[in-house]
Image: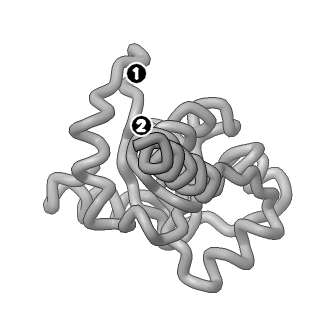
Amino acid sequence: MRQTIAFCCLALAVLAARAEVIDIDNAQLAQMTKNGVTVIDIRTKAEWEETGIVPGSKLLTFFDAQGRHDAAGWLERVKPLAKPNEAVIVICRTGNRTKPVSQFLSQQAGYTTVYNVKHGIKGWIGAGGAVEPATQSIASCKAGKTC
């Protein structure tokens, strides 16, 4: 019995060790997007419209304008975009909101590799990173009820 408990604890520790949140910079974001890693932009519609988005980003607001969220509902909309065994990049305005969201994906939702863009879209734009208008992406996610 002790061996079974010890084995289960070890197995859980190994699984927990596999789940990681990795802070990335703009060069890493550029390379990973070229390699097809899914980027989920958790900002609000107004923020997407203000700055544009990293090309190809999936738009999926986590926190509303008042800071409220529905983690379980949000997760259900993430699953079709990125599976728990696939790498995923999370971006917000400056990298602050993505920290708890990245930890949620990694520690509670079972995502094994979550990348957090350290300085968010502001850092990306400041470094000359490409953005595209969010209009078409917003229309697409509204049609699919995924924003």
- Residue under the point 61% across and 64% down: 131
In the image, is residue 7 above or below residue 102?
below
Is residue 97 rendered to the left or right of residue 60?
A: right
Tags 2 and 1 touching, CB below 8 Å: yes
Q: Position of residue 31 (x, y in %)?
A: 73, 78
| Residue 118 at least partly seen | yes
Q: Residue furthest top?
A: 66
Q: Residue at horizontal 58%, vertical 47%?
A: 13
What amino acid is labelled 1 in the image?
Ala
Q: Total number of numbered labels?
A: 2
Residue sitting at x 25%, y 59%: 141
- Measured from the top left, where is residue 108 in percent x and y? 42, 39
Residue at 52%, 63% in the rendered image: 88
Secondary structure under badge 1? loop
Residue 66 occupies quadrant: top left
Identify residue type, mark 2: Thr
Neighbour tally class for label 2: few under 14, some 14-19, many 20 plus, Cα within 10 Å: some
| Circle number at residue 65 | 1
Q: Nearer the viewer, residue 131 or 96?
A: 96
Residue identified by numbered label 2: 44
Determine whether the residue tagged by mark 2 lies in a helix, strand or loop.
loop
Whether residue 41 is visible, yes or no, is: no
Asked whether, in this view, residue 67 is left or right of residue 77, the answer is right
Instruction: Please say if 28 is above or below 100.
Output: below
Image quadrant containing the N terminus: top left
